[in-house]
Image: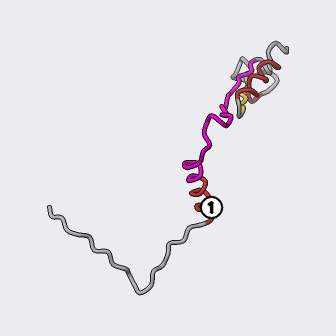
Amino acid sequence: MSVSKAKFEQKGDTFIKKQQNNQKKKKIKRVEEKALGWGGFDDAKRIVPTSVLLKNMFRPAELRVYEKHPLGAILVKFKNRQDGLKCIQTMNGRW
């Protein structure tokens, strides 16, 4: 194995700058601001997505698509936990 100094040479007579699209520039700027900014988890609400499984929402005979599912279950996804808890409180014992 041998080691030697690297030789950097310009190809051609003029320098051609690599072009970036605007979306990449905005993304890089946003990432830099987030990394170097003062904001953190302590001053912003964290959004925790949650899912709620609702059972006995339909009878399998009512919907032919779900004939194989005897519980009549539906999965509802929410962006934050409070909305999911509100759904559970509203739908629990409704029928």
Front-lying residue, 22 or 75: 22
As for residue 32 lying within the magenta part, the answer is: yes
Note whether 4 is above or below 93 in the view shown: below
Res 78 → quadrant: top right
Left or right? Give the position of 7 relative to 12. Answer: left
Res 24 → quadrant: bottom right
Instruction: State the residue at coordinates (55%, 49%).
Output: 36
Front-lying residue, 28 or 64: 28
The kind of residue tagged 1 is Gln
Is disc 1 placed on a helix, strand or loop? Answer: helix
Instruction: State the residue at coordinates (60%, 39%).
Output: 40
Colour scheme in use: secondary structure
Residue 66 rendering spot, x and y as whole percentages: 73, 26
| Residue range of the region highlighted in magenta in the rendering | 31-55
Left or right? Give the position of 50 relative to 37. Answer: right
Q: Which quadrant holds the N terminus?
A: bottom left
Q: Would you call the spot at circle 1 few (<14 residues within 10 Å), some (14-19), or many (20 or more)? A: few
Instruction: State the residue at coordinates (70%, 27%).
Output: 81
Instruction: State the residue at coordinates (71%, 18%).
Output: 70
Front-lying residue, 80 or 72: 80
Residue 43 rendering spot, x and y as whole percentages: 66, 36
As for residue 75 lying within the magenta part, the answer is: no
Q: Which quadrant holds the C terminus?
A: top right
Note whether 51 is above or below 24 in the view shown: above
**Hey, which residue is sitting farthest left in the picture?**
1
Note whether 48 is above or below 32 in the view shown: above
**Hey, which residue is sitting farthest bottom in the picture?**
13
Label 1, on which residue? 23
Residue 13 rendering spot, x and y as whole percentages: 41, 87
